[in-house]
Image: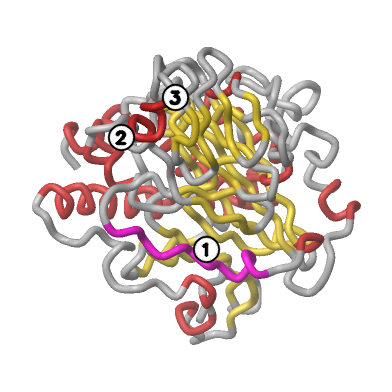
Amino acid sequence: MIREDLEMLTQTAAGTVMGEIMRQFWVPAVRAARLEADGAPVRVRLLGENYVAFRATDGRVGFFDEGCPHRCTSLALARNEDNALTCIFHGWKIDVSGKVVDVPSEPPERRNEFAVKVRVNHYPVREAAGLVWVWLGRGEQAAFPDFAFTALAHDQVRAMSARLNCNWLQALELLLDPARFELSSRTLESVSDNPPVIEVERTDYGFRGAALTELPDGEHHARIIQWLMPGFTLIPAVSGHLELAACAVPIDDTQCLLWLIFFSPKGPIASDTLGAQGILARDPDNFAAGVGASESFWREGQPHASSRSLLDDVAFPQAQGPIQNLADQRLCSSDQMVMEARQFLSEALRAYQEGRPVPGLGAPVQYAKLHAGAGVLEPGDDWRLFSR
């Protein structure tokens, strides 16, 4: 890939190619539990722009540009009441649908006529899996990604996010790194003696990737993930029946949100299951608070040890710097999924620039049928059939 492509992948502000592509996909914006009916609006920053989310009196969620359309004072300061936000600067009132319903600063005889002319940028939202999802695009709205976990009961899903001081692509590529998983579940010596073989199969929406580790009897253990444009991954069970979906969403070009969505299709999530991941007692809106680029929980006193802690993992992309110069990296065979994702994203950039359909936005994606998987393959078995 050329340097220009690599740089474009990391730029997501309004008007950038990658930024415009990402705005055409539904993304998680805020945990639904943070929004209380008639409670304080919540500031949300995505793709270099500022928004507010709030839950109206009747339970509906509104998602607006942060600035009041009058003088652009933050609507995070607004009063949330009567199914509307009332700006405390001059009393302009905007209902949950984005309609201006009162303009006290205008003469009474002109208020209605004036109000209907005011444009308020508000955005479609959906609540699913304990999250408020938002679509920030223009034109025809994309279909909502109805993953299997979005239909589960409340006690079968747990969503958490980490605010990372790095570009979104670095967080995504952490999720596409089977070598890191092997190093966190086996000793360095055993991985060195028997490294996994990485294979990737492209799809209309991204790819399926497998890490295949040979076993002593000629069988292979397969860990199969799904990557979906632009930043979503489905990851094999992390503990028992607990599965994981993860998503990297840009806050801006030097910060991102890493969303983890734990789910249990077979029943409620047990507290001890999540507790084993080391994050249960942490802030669900930033479970990595205090874990920066220089921290690692396993390093002290264990110079050769490995760790399965998710808190360890979030230090690594931050330690690459706010925006890693991708051209400086020397990738190897274990980076096959990373290389494939970069190439796929680069091709998406070209498609957008040339007016062609962007992968994942053209033909409908059957999200509910997609899943990750892990298991043992008999000699001669094809992991591609195993994962379907």
Task: Give the CA distance from mark 3 to mark 2.
Answer: 15 Å
Q: Which mark is residue 117?
A: 2
- Helix or strand or loop: what does disc 2 sit on? loop
Is 93 included in the stretch rendered in magenta? Answer: no
Question: Could you say which is closer to the camera, residue 188 or residue 122?
Answer: 122
- Helix or strand or loop: what does disc 3 sit on? helix
Instruction: Point out residue 121 in the picture as x, y percentages from the top left corner.
Output: 38, 37
Residue density around tag 2, few if under 14, some if 14–19, many if 20 or more, within 10 Å:
few
Instruction: Point out residue 344 in the picture as x, y percentages from the top left corner.
Output: 28, 54
Is 142 included in the stretch rendered in magenta? Answer: yes
Q: Amino acid at mark 2?
A: Lys
- Looking at the picture, does residue 98 appear above or below residue 179? above
Which residue shows up at 54% across the image and 74% down it?
Answer: 368
Instruction: Point out residue 95 in the picture as x, y percentages from the top left corner.
Output: 53, 40
Task: Give the CA distance from mark 3 to mark 1.
Answer: 60 Å
Q: Which mark is residue 225?
A: 1
Q: What residue range appears in magenta?
A: 140-151
Residue topped by disc 3: 108
Q: Amino acid at mark 1?
A: Ile
- Marks 3/2 in contact by CB < 8 Å: the verdict is no
Mark 1 / mark 2, whichever is N-terminal:
2
